[in-house]
Image: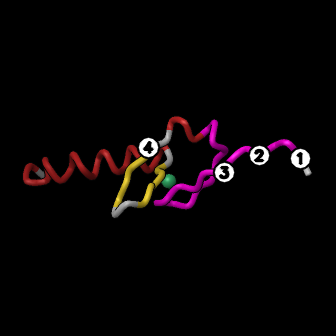
Amino acid sequence: MGMDDEETVTCSYCGTQASASDALAWTTAVERGRQQRFCVTCSRANLRAMEGKLDSEWW
Ligand SMILES: [Zn+2]
């Protein structure tokens, strides 16, 4: 048994895994009472998608 209990975080979107310390930069969102984690790449994609929705009429 090790003392290393570093948590692994999985991206809810693409399934990428990172240690909890690396995942500090990730986005946390709560959907239907469940905590979702999104990696940096997916966070950007989500942000773009959210902004894209607002701006979609321009495209
Ligand atoms: Zn991801």
Q: Mark 3 falls on what kind of element?
A: strand
Q: Mark 1 falls on what kind of element?
A: loop
Tell me, for residue 27, which label it has, or none.
Answer: 4
Which is in the foreground here, disc 1 or disc 3? Answer: 1
Q: Which of the 4 quarters of the picture holds residue 44? A: top left
Label 3 environment density (alpha carbons within 10 Å; few <14, some 14–19, many ≥20): few
The amino acid sitting under disc 3 is Thr
Quick one: label 2 or label 4, which is nearer the N terminus? 2
Residue 42 in percent (x, y) is at 44, 50
The amino acid sitting under disc 4 is Thr
Residue 7 in percent (x, y) is at 68, 48
Q: Report how far apart the C-alphas of labels 1 and 4 lie in the structure.
A: 29 Å
Which is in the foreground here, disc 3 or disc 2? Answer: 2
Q: Report how far apart the C-alphas of labels 3 and 4 lie in the structure.
A: 15 Å
Q: Is residue 15 left or right of residue 36?
A: right
Q: Is residue 11 magenta?
A: yes
Residue 51 in percent (x, y) is at 21, 45
Q: Report how far apart the C-alphas of labels 2 and 1 lie in the structure.
A: 7 Å
Label 1 environment density (alpha carbons within 10 Å; few <14, some 14–19, many ≥20): few
Q: Which residue is mark 3?
A: 8
Q: Which residue is mark 2?
A: 5
Q: Which residue is mark 1?
A: 2
Q: Report how far apart the C-alphas of labels 2 and 4 lie in the structure.
A: 22 Å
Q: Report how far apart the C-alphas of labels 3 and 2 lie in the structure.
A: 9 Å
Magenta segment range?
3-22
